[in-house]
Image: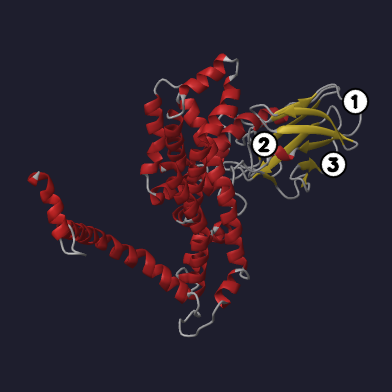
Amino acid sequence: MTATTAPSQATATRPAGSAPPGTNAQQRAKRRRRVVAVAFVLPALLLLGALVVYPVLFSVGRSLFDASGNRFVGGENYTEVFRDPATLKAIRNSTIWIVVAPTVLTGLGLILAVLVEKVRWATAFKLLLFLPMAVSFLAAGITFRLAYEEDPDKGVLNAAAVGVHDAFKGSSSYPSARARDGQGLTKASDGSYATSGTVSPGGTAILGLVGVAPKDVPSQAEPAFPASARQAAGTELRGVVYLDFAPGGGGEQGKVDKTESGLPDMAVEAVRDGKTVAQATTAADGSFSFRDLDPGAYTLRLPPKNFAPPYEGVSWLGPALVTPAIIGAYLWIWTGFAMVLIGAGLASLPRDTLEAARMDGATEWQVFRKITVPLLAPILTVVFVTLVINVMKVFDLVYIIAPGPVQEDATVLATQMWLVSFGGGNNQGLGSALGVLLLLLVIPAMVFNVRRFRRSQS
């Protein structure tokens, strides 16, 4: 009885308002934990404040002053942002980036993630596509700047384009050839050459050209002199196209000398009443002939395809294509990121749902469109928004890949901010306003992503 009543007696004798035993020790332990937590977090907070908070606040303040930083101008810099043509072009280009790059990357990542599941060496394939993420934007920019070179001897893309073009359409054999003045050939506006007079069947035409370097004469070319001596007979019209230049000098202009070379593979047309009635190609000695021509006078024409300049490829870094070209480099870098992230979400999908749909007769396309994509919608949204945030800040690729003359055509908000502030504009007030604008555009996407992550963890 005494043992059971002792605690109640002790409780009854405790002074009113006093803490139970052990409470002070628990409070001291909590305070110690808080102090330790603050001690660990404080360096990170100081670093965050120095590298993020202070620059943001400073930029907001600096954007309210003029270029010198001495005169308060209020919102004048923000008004100038939407009046400057270069800045408006940067906003337009940034919009193109935001619409195109994240959409294409998310689509590519989804397609590749689904296809990789059916590849035997899936891990190696993922590693191969993810490798560009290890390359810095500086190195990637230099690499693609070289790949986009317009000279086919330097730029690999134009080398491939020229190779494909020449394989299907061929190239002119004599782009630098021209007729010597006063030697019976006149040049038309389309680049072709035609005889000043007419030739009839049974006659021979001597067509001399210059401007072809000896090293550019085809190796199969033979001397034109024997061909020039042959005579046409009956309804045949003969001729010879030759290089009116004797190696080592000498010779007579307008006549075929024994050392002068014929020009093979040259297209020749016989024209009558403005219409081409016959076509021929010169032989190794430059000779050509038209047989069974109707009686009458003909003009001989060397069509412009003989003299067309060689195909030089695509001007990837010209004003029209520079932005798509840079976006292409960006896609090369970030496709692996999108694929791996979406692939992780794809691996967590309930397989029984997919198999049940297949057993019910759904095709692979129906499974992909009506089950896989809807189930992946949350991860696709996160990937898309993350890429939007990243695209808004793109700087390195644009600055490195775009040549100086087209820098303004490719500029985005980040590069325009740098150019206005430090790249010659020397107006840090306007540059700060651009920085604040960029921050305001990024914040909604960041908030959306943070809320997404919190909802997924709850």
* Residue 221, image x, y percentages: 60, 30
Q: Residue at x 60, y 41 (%)?
A: 246
- Where residue 407 appears, as percent x and y from the top left, is 53, 59
Mark 2 belongs to which amino acid? Tyr
Q: Secondary structure at mark 1?
A: loop
On the image, numbered disc 1 is attached to which residue? 294
For marks 1 and 2, give the CA distance.
26 Å
- Residue type at mark 3? Gly
CA neighbours of label 3 inside 10 A, class few (<14), some (14 to 19), many (20+): few
Residue that appears at 41% across and 42% down: 457
> Of tags 1 and 2, which is closer to the observer?
1
- Residue sitting nearer the eye, 177 or 313: 313
Q: For the residue labelled by badge 3, is the local secondary structure a helix, a strand or a loop?
A: loop
Counting the numbered discs, the total is 3
Q: Is residue 278 left or right of residue 173?
A: right
Q: Depth-wise, is mark 1 or mark 3 nearer the camera?
A: 1
Residue occupying image coordinates x 25% and y 62%: 43
**The N terminus lies in which quarter of the figure?**
top left
Q: CA distance from mark 1 to mark 3?
A: 18 Å
Q: Which residue is mark 2?
A: 242
> Do residues under tags 1 and 2 come within 8 Å of each other at their CB atoms?
no
Distance Cα–Cα, label 3 vs label 2: 18 Å
Can you tell which quarter of the image residue 175 is in? top right
Q: Earlier in the sequence, mark 3 or mark 2?
A: 3
441 on left or right of 40 = right
Q: Quadrant of residue 206?
A: top right
**Near-viewer residue (35 or 3):** 3
Q: Residue at x 52, y 31 (%)?
A: 111
